[in-house]
Amino acid sequence: MKKSVLLLLLLCFSAYTLKAQNASPTYKLISGGDWVKAKNYYLLTLLEQDRAANALLKSDAELNKLAQAKANALQASLRNCKDALCLPAQIKFTDDEIHIVSARLNALCKPGSTLDKLVTTQLIPSGAYIIYKATTSADLLVKAWEQDAAAVNHTISVYAEGLKPNYPAIDSISFNTKARGYYTLMYDCSAEVAESTKGTTLFFEPALQAALLYLEVNERRDAAQFEPMLTTANKLAADRVKQIKWANYPYTHILVPGAGPEDRGTPLSGEGMLRCKAAARQYRLGVAPFVVVSGGNVHPYKTKYNEAKEMRDYMIDVLHIPTNAVMIEPHARHTTTNIRNDARMVFRYGMPFTKPGLIVTDKYQNDFITNMANRCQKELGYMPYKLGKRLSETALEFYPAIESLQIDADEPMDP
């Protein structure tokens, strides 16, 4: 009898572990009216939007006490902080606060509870925290919370306190934190957060709203550009996906990573044009029904030009590729995320996920991609693709990886 019970428990454990990794291609991310917030801090967005979960957190005595403490600390900082960097520092989550919340979420997330349902119907199918090998709903919920808390703190550190981001040349803060006027800006930001969150009993709201505000005043809301792409910028091509006879093509799509110009007045670099030409040739050979052009507003620092948009216009207007065959991926800031973001699109747009795509770029970038595993592991924590055959200097097969759905906690412009 004991062996039977043990076997049943093991089977249940295995079933949950498998389910926990089962992201759904039909799942639609909930934006809550703010794509920057949803793409960076998805659990916190869900906790705001789900009425039952929202009410549960507001009614919890310990979390309510924390919410009041955070509001009081914010008000006190306006009275007491005489240094610019003191103000944002008072808004961030402390390690003790993060641990308190983790303990409460673990206690509240019982089987069949409101939070358990949130995990199973939203968090798991979203794939937003897919790399965490959680064994229970509570375990995954706590891991997601701790990631979001760290992501909020990181945003505040970089875009208010001036911490160097992963790539300072393109992603740094827009202000001189030592300038005389910076204290006024930080004071006004804290005052705005205090006013906009007045009366809230959700413990995470002041820090969350501060992170979003710092991104906004830095003009760093890149993550929201062109969203929701599925129903706007990419609608014509996305609508064709379900009509494609995939057996007629060796590849689902051609991915073209962007190449930013060196000066602020140039919309599309010469290298970007050449990559588009190579991709257009492959498209006309019939190797894939779609071309995905990938790249954000990256080079030079704070450029107004978006690599994907400029390449899309060039593909359509100059190279005469059909409009409904070209998709944009306008957020990637690095070669690693060109492929990661592309994999996300393949999954969410309903292309066959086990079928390869084809990267078309210059020889040197393809050389780099074939040896990029260490960089991916360092920056993302996983490989967003598996390599296939190198067909030529400019063409390289790849297979998307489901881990690509994972939110990146330290890249708020392209999480």
Image: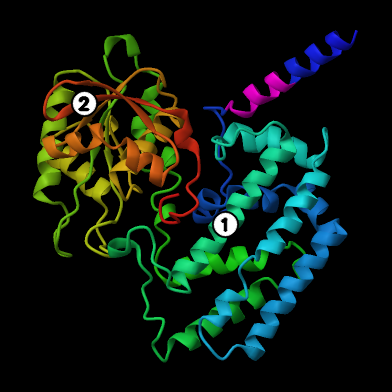
Q: Position of residue 283 (x, y in %)?
A: 18, 25
Q: Is residue 25 left or right of residue 205?
A: left
Q: Is residue 211 magenta?
A: no
- Element carrying mark 2: strand
Q: Position of residue 411 (x, y in %)?
A: 43, 54
Specify the quadrant of the image occupied by residue 293: top left
Which range of residues does the magenta coloring cover? 13-22
Q: Earlier in the sequence, mark 1 or mark 2?
A: 1
Rendered image: mark on residue 216:
none
Q: Nearer the viewer, residue 184 or 385?
A: 385
Report the Cα–Cα distance between label 1 and label 2: 36 Å
- Element carrying mark 1: helix
Using the rendered image of the protein, determine whether residue 167 is visible from the camera's viewpoint: yes
Label 1 crowd (10 A; few <14 / some 14-19 / many >=20): many
Name the colour scheme. rainbow
Badge nearest the viewer, 1 or 2? 1
Quadrant where the N terminus sits is top right
| Residue at the image position 61 percent from the left and 68 percent from the top | 92
Using the rendered image of the protein, determine whether residue 204 is visible from the camera's viewpoint: no
Q: Read off the residue under disc 2.
A: 396
In the displayed image of the protein, which residue is found farthest to the right?
1
Q: Nearer the viewer, residue 364 or 232?
A: 364
Specify the quadrant of the image occupied by residue 358: top left
Q: Is residue 155 left or right of residue 108?
A: left
Q: Read off the residue under disc 1.
A: 150
Q: Position of residue 208 (x, y in %)?
A: 60, 63
In the displayed image of the protein, which residue is found farthest to the front?
3
Q: Is residue 90 above or below residue 101?
A: below
Q: Is residue 65 above or below residue 395?
A: below
Mark 1 and 2 residues: CB-CB less than 8 Å, in contact?
Answer: no
